[in-house]
Amino acid sequence: MYSYTEREGLRLGLVGWVKNTFSGTVVGQVQGPADMVEEMKVWLSKEGSPTSRITRASFTNQRTIDKLELSGFKTRF
């Protein structure tokens, strides 16, 4: 079963991972075409999963890459 975030990442053709932290935040890494990454950032900051309560979104360590370094889109535990 896919999480809502996995499903959205796959729908956008992205690769990466997400993980819920013990402090109630989400961390992860997303790679793909810049416009799709931006769309994912909007989804993460405004919508998220139906049970999420988003109060703030922060995206750091952004950089351009020559080729994808990951494959698939997974939820880590």
Image (cartoon, rainbow, N blue to C red):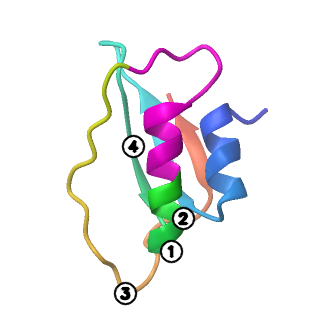
Q: Residue at x 30, y 77 (%)?
A: 64
Q: Which residue is mark 2?
A: 36
Q: Which residue is mark 1?
A: 33
Q: In the drawing, does residue 7 fall left or right of residue 38? A: right
Q: Which residue is mark 3?
A: 66
Q: Earlier in the sequence, mark 1 or mark 4?
A: 4
Mark 1–mark 4 Cα distance, whole angstroms, equals 17 Å
Q: Viewer-nearest of labels 3 and 1?
A: 1
Mark 2–mark 4 Cα distance, whole angstroms, equals 16 Å
Tell me the SS state at disc 2: helix
Mark 3–mark 1 Cα distance, whole angstroms, equals 11 Å
Tell me the SS state at disc 4: strand
Q: Residue at x 65, y 19 (%)?
A: 50
The span picked out in magenta is 40-54
**Which mark, by number, is residue 71?**
none
| Residue placed furthest toward the right | 1
Which x, y percent locates residue 55?
Answer: 35, 19
Q: Viewer-nearest of labels 1 and 4?
A: 1
Foreground pick, 48 / 77: 48
- Contact (CB < 8 A) between labels 3 and 2? no
